[in-house]
Image: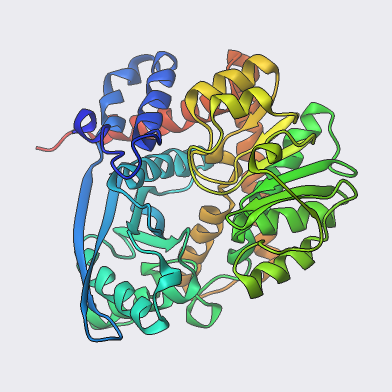
Amino acid sequence: MSKILTNLSYLDPARPAPWSSFLEQIDRVAPHLGNLARWIETLKHPKRVLVVDVPIVRDDGSVAHFEGYRVQHNLSRGPGKGGVRFHPDVSLNEVMALAGWMTVKNAALGLPFGGAKGGVRIDPRTLSRGELERVTRRYTSEIGIVIGPDKDIPAPDVGSDQQIMAWMMDTYSVNVGHTASGVVTGKPVALGGSLGRQEATGRGVFIAAREAGVRSGIAVQGARVAVQGFGNVGSIAARIFAEHGARVVAIQDVGGSFFNPAGIDVPAAMAHTATQGSLAGFAGAGAIGADEFWRTECEFLVPAALEGQLTVPRAESLRTRIVVEGANGPTLPAADDVLRERGILLVPDVLANAGGVTVSYFEWVQDFSSFFWSEDEINARLETIMVKAFTAIWTLSAERQVSLRTAAFIIACQRVLAAREQRGLYP
């Protein structure tokens, strides 16, 4: 299956297939797995792939069909966990890779989950609220056979939010005949969501960057930061950087790229995108070209948009000291090699953006116990887990003389494959 699906980057022939990147990352870690390497093919074959038709009646009375996916990559360590992406470029190839990265991410952080991911190929900005609700509910009903609080727990991702999760939870609950608040995470607090969840991914990016800076002799205070992608992850990370004394000098999203050497007013940029939908027309910084953004001189670069953004040419032109991956899979494997050769430290996605799934884990636990923690408790627990994971990965990286990504994959793959071996095969 993996060899066939590797070639499914059919949406854009020039765009590298994310699943190919994931497979290459798995191949790179194989020599470090010892006897567990006999199980390595487990990670190259998703456990379950579901492709669904999502038909709805549009507001004008016409019937529209959208394609949806739910991929469960590996469930050896627990139920599937991963977001649902609403985006016009969603493909099965992409969702498979994202599910694979979730397997690694959850294992690297020590969370009791396997990896899963979902998506619907739509542009949510072109749908009315009613149409978006109908898409969400139909999609939830179609994947209802594989999700559940102890089977597979979706969460928000690109193009989805807490309202989408509320509709998903309600749809699933109606279909099973009782309220199942734990079927999704990232819900509104009033429906069993967790305090701190909305900011968790961006906060985790900052924690990972800070820890990398401490070990590299680069203080956050006074550091220059560039952020690609100014959605929930990028904007929150930028805001927390600024709150800790960093200067966010460059930001970029679909609306354009902007630069201000004195530092951008991040709350003003967030307010602009909240009302305008993107950074287009933002007056708080000068507009620059997209390629110029990647040449911004800074201490921390945070790619927080989509996968495959940091290519070899861009890696060769970067003028940063640390790359902190806020997005999933933003750096191509060949670009990884370029950064390492140039002495640019890269904090991988499976560690850097794990704050979201960590607090999703807290939400899941709180829903099961019906006992909820304060936001301070949530942030303190997030800090503890992320610092512990970062320290273990950094230590192994130094011991084995490998990149942080390879170290994270070694730890994660050992945990996943040990679970696979101990569980055995049935029948």
* Residue at (71, 50) in percent of width and height: 251
Q: Nearer the viewer, residue 91 or 322?
A: 91
Q: Is residue 273 above or below residue 333?
A: below
Percent across and percent down for residue 217 are 84, 28
Q: Residue 195 appears at what percent x and percent y?
A: 61, 71
Residue 181, x across and y down, in percent: 40, 75
Where residue 283 sits, quadrant-wise, is bottom right
Of residues 412 and 420, the one nearer the viewer is: 412
Colouring of the image: rainbow
Can residue 115 be seen in this snapshot? yes
Q: Residue at x 33, y 53 (%)?
A: 79
Vertical placement of 336 versus 251: above or below? above
| Horizontal side, residue 309 vs residue 203: left or right | left
Left-right relation of 191 to 226: left
Q: Nearer the viewer, residue 182 or 260?
A: 260
* Residue 373 position (above or below residue 214): below
Q: Position of residue 30 (x, y in %)?
A: 39, 18
For image coordinates 67% across by 61% down, the residue present is: 279
Check the image and report above or below for 68 versus 128.
above
Indicate left or right for 179 with 277 as reference: left
Q: Quadrant of the N terminus?
A: top left
Number of labels in the image equals 0
Q: Who's the residue at 68% across and 59% down the image?
A: 236
* Residue 255 image-quadrant placement: bottom right
